[in-house]
Each structure stands twice: as C-alpha cells, then as structure tokens.
Image (cartoon, rainbow, N blue to C red):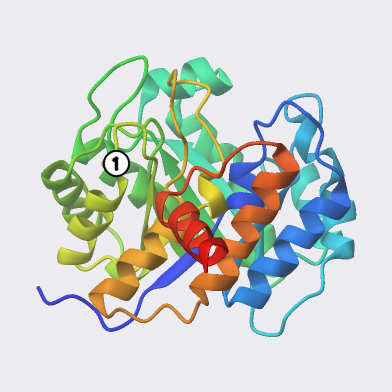
Amino acid sequence: MALPDKVKVVEVGPRDGLQNEKETIPAEVKIALVDRLSAAGFVNIEAASFVSPKWVPQMATSTEVMAGITRKPGVVYSVLTPNMKGFEAALAARADEVVIFASASEAFSQKNINCSIAESIARFAEVAAAAKAHNLRLRGSISCAFGCPYQGEVSPDSVADVVRQLRALGCDEIDIADTIGVGTPRHVQSVMTRAAQEFDIAGLSGHFHDTYGQALANIYASLEVGIRIFHSSVAGLGGCPYAKGATGNVASEDVLYMMRGLGIETGIDLDAVVDAGQFIAQHLGRKAVSRAGNALAAKRSAT
C-alpha cells in the first residue's frame, strides 16, 4: 500500500503526557502549552482529564485549563471522561470530544480498574449515549493492545473484540495503544489489520510509546497498512507507571520530522512544536525527550 499524502497527528501531551508528573504544574503553564500547540497547527489536542483528583492529582486543574485556553476555530479539544460525573464536567467545560477507554488485556483491566473488559465497557454505555445526545465526538482508546505488564502477550483477536464493543457504543475514532511500548513493526501490522476488520481503518489511530525505541518504526509500519491518524506528545512527555524506565509517548517533534522527510503533510509547524517542547521542558527542569526537538533547538541556538 502506498504511503498517504496526509495524516492527522493528535497531540496528547497536555493530558497523557503531564498526568504522571509528580510536581503540580500550574494551570497557566498548561494553558500556555495548549495554546502553543493549537497555534502550531494541531487540529486535535487532548487537553484535560475529568477523573477524580484523588487518583490523578495533576488533572485537578482541568476545569481551569479548559476555561483558560484560547480556542482556535477548527481545533478539537478532547478530554478523558471515566464516568458520568466526568462527562458532566466535560460538557460544562465545552469539550469537543470525550474519550472513553478499555484494555485489550483482562489482567490489566482487573489490576487497573478491578473489573473485566466487558464490565468496563458496559460502564461507558451511559457516557457514550450522553455524548451522542449532545453531538460530541466520541473516541475510544484501547490500552495494552500489543502487550500487557501482567499477562504478557495480547492477541490481535482480543484487540478486535474490544474494537467491536467500542464500535457498538458509537465511537467515531478508536485508538490502538501500545501502553508499555513492546510492539514491533510486523506485530503492529497484524494487530492494525485485524482491528480494521471490525472498524473503518480511516477512524483507527496508532498510539505508540517508545519504551524499547520502536515507536517511529511502528508508526511507519502502520502507515504501510493504511493507518492515517497518530498520537504523539510534545517533548516526549509522559511515562508509563507500569513499565520501569519507560520514556512514554513518542515525541511529537520526532513524528513530525519523520513525516516531513517522507513528504507527508501534517499541517503542523515543526519549528513551533520544537519551541513548545523546549518551553515545557524548561518549566519541568529537564531536557525534552525528543531527539529531533533537541537537535533542532541546538542547531538553532548555534546559528
């Protein structure tokens, strides 16, 4: 299959990237980050999460963040909503898209949220129906689609089964996520191809972590089988609490640099994303986890 002329890159740094940071990040810093990312040209930004602050303290400022951002026309601002309380908060915050989530691994589902995959998806039926009733986009995210820290291998059929259940809830888009970053290119192609038997491939997205340095290779492998939507995190923000030493999400700068080299249009200004990455890395007091971002920033400062 020929590579596409264009892809959509979903920026997940403000939510998925920052949620595990130990030090509280002020709302104004998160707002500035989201605004920099929308100005750079991202058309979909995962901006916040309406989960209990008891479980994810970093997301306690989500209402403030959603109220403070400068909304750019045409940009979809997404929020994670684990239940109806979260959905009501998302609605009040004028979110454009709500994100629900399930695991492809029974062991992960039991360890993480103390219920089966089927039970977890059933819990989202009310949220999904409410999203549709309010004309909000609904996105489903499948964690541990390529491997689980507890059960190990996860079969493509297990992923397809969850895709089918999320499709039944009315999801507009479904993320296939490598939560612990263990996927490799051929494995990724087999999972994506199987998932596409249950859901329009145009609505499937790849969400890769770079734990074993395979994320860019996995994105390229996904392009080869028809995937056209990818998630990334500015400055490589994020880590996975279930995989020691995990670097977390693939860096947006690295993905954009690769797409530019392939001649694939993203509509995103790489230089502006490098600036955003350096901005948040400076606030966090550490170097960005983006090879392309750091190289481009260093090249710029040397001239």
Label total for image = 1
Residue drawn 80% across the image and 43% down it: 85
Residue 188 appears in view: yes
Q: Is residue 82 left or right of residue 257?
A: right
From what the image shows, is residue 190 above or below residue 97? above
Residue drawn 20% across the image and 33% down it: 155
Q: Is residue 36 left or right of residue 147?
A: right
Q: Nearer the viewer, residue 191 or 39?
A: 39
Residue linked to disc 1:
159
Residue 96 appears in view: no
Please provide percent x and percent y for residue 280.
69, 50
Please provide percent x and percent y for residue 140.
49, 52
Q: Is residue 294 left or right of residue 97?
A: left
Residue drawn 45% across the image and 33% down it: 247
**Displayed quadrant of residue 285:** top right
**Displayed quadrant of residue 28:** bottom right
Q: Nearer the viewer, residue 215 or 110?
A: 215
**Displayed quadrant of residue 167:** bottom left
Farthest-out residue, front: 303
From what the image shows, is residue 236 above or below residue 134? above
Amino acid on which the number 1 mark rests in the picture: Val
Q: Nearer the viewer, residue 267 or 7?
A: 267
Q: Nearer the viewer, residue 41 or 147?
A: 41
From what the image shows, is residue 234 above or below residue 262? above
Please provide percent x and percent y for residue 266.
42, 77
Binning the other alpha carbons within 10 Å of mark 1 as few (below 14), some (14 to 19) or many (20 upward) gives many
Report helix, strand or loop for mark 1: helix
**Quadrant of the frame with the N terminus:** bottom left
